[in-house]
Amino acid sequence: MKKLEQLYEGKAKKVFATEDPDVVIVDYKDDATAFNGEKKGTIEGKGVINNRMTNHVFKLLEKEGVPTHLIEELSDRETAVKKVEIVPLEVIIRNVAAGSFSKRLGVEEGTPFQEPTIEFSYKNDELGDPLINSYFAVALGLATWEEIDTIKKYAFKVNEVLKAYFLQADIKLIDFKIEFGRFHGEILLADETSPDTCRLWDVNTNEKLDKDRFRRDLGNVEEAYNEVFKRLGLA
Ligand code: C5P
């Protein structure tokens, strides 16, 4: 597959056109940002880990009935994916209180929930990705009710599959963010699922094995990404 012109450069990935208008190539970078781009850095080897891990997880999810944009892994950092129109919503599922939830509601980090929660943020850098609800999303024309229902159904399914997947590696899935896209009228899971977009804690010690190590200057960032990669048998 031939890589043509660059279509887009995001915080962690570049996207290139191919000869097929329905296919793009995603190229994962080692660049890391946090707090809406205010904090910048590099996590060496992250691009390779996030590419491999996302593709592995997406294949697993396909088998479990969640359609994804994945076509084919092309190299360590490059993957061919279906060219979707991203639904401008960050979909966040939480199993345990942490991060912005703990801050907003004054609930101590690590407090488990009775049931998983779902929330939506409006993907808008200028506004800092504000929290919205599904009525806002429909009112603003970001998605239809039918799409919201599909997204919710898939998001909770992703949670069920990933909770079990990480647990067999002695990792607790605290929360995660996913994104969806439209492809010829169908909703597909898109973007990535990696230690950049999930909170992953060691099941015994609660040690953080994810991007919070970078966000909060906890040190051993690369080691944590490598540990997850190794435990999942992907290294
Ligand atoms: O910061 P907050 O607690 O809202 O994050 C919830 C989850 O969503 C975390 O796993 C975090 O890594 C992920 N997230 C993300 N990209 C963002 C915001 C949050 O991947 N822009």
Image (cartoon, rainbow, N blue to C red):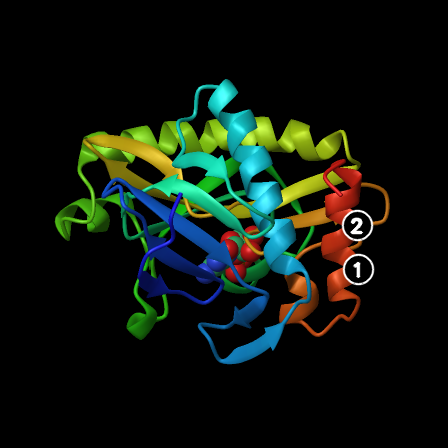
Toward the viewer: 233 or 172? 233
Vertical arrangement, residue 183 with respect to residue 153, above or below: below
Vertical arrangement, residue 59 with respect to residue 229, above or below: above
Residue 223's label in the rendered image is: 1
Whether the residue carrying mark 1 lies under 8 Å from ligand 1 is answered with no
Instruction: Report the residue marked by disc 2.
Output: 227
Rendered image quadrant of residue 20: top left
Toward the viewer: 135 or 172? 172
Percent coordinates x, y for residue 73 in the rendering: 52, 39
Amino acid marked by disc 2: Glu
Q: Is residue 84 visible?
A: yes
Q: Residue at x 48, y 26 (%)?
A: 157
Q: Quadrant of the N terminus?
A: top left
Percent coordinates x, y for residue 201 in the rendering: 73, 48
Neighbour tally class for label 2: few under 14, some 14-19, many 20 plus, Cα within 10 Å: some
Q: Residue at x 17, y 45 (%)?
A: 138
Percent coordinates x, y for residue 93 in the rendering: 49, 42
**SS under mark 1:** helix
Toward the viewer: 216 or 233? 233
Q: Residue at x 59, y 65 (%)?
A: 30
Amino acid marked by disc 1: Glu
**SS under mark 2:** helix
Rendered image quadrant of residue 43: bottom right
Q: Quadrant of the C terminus?
A: top right
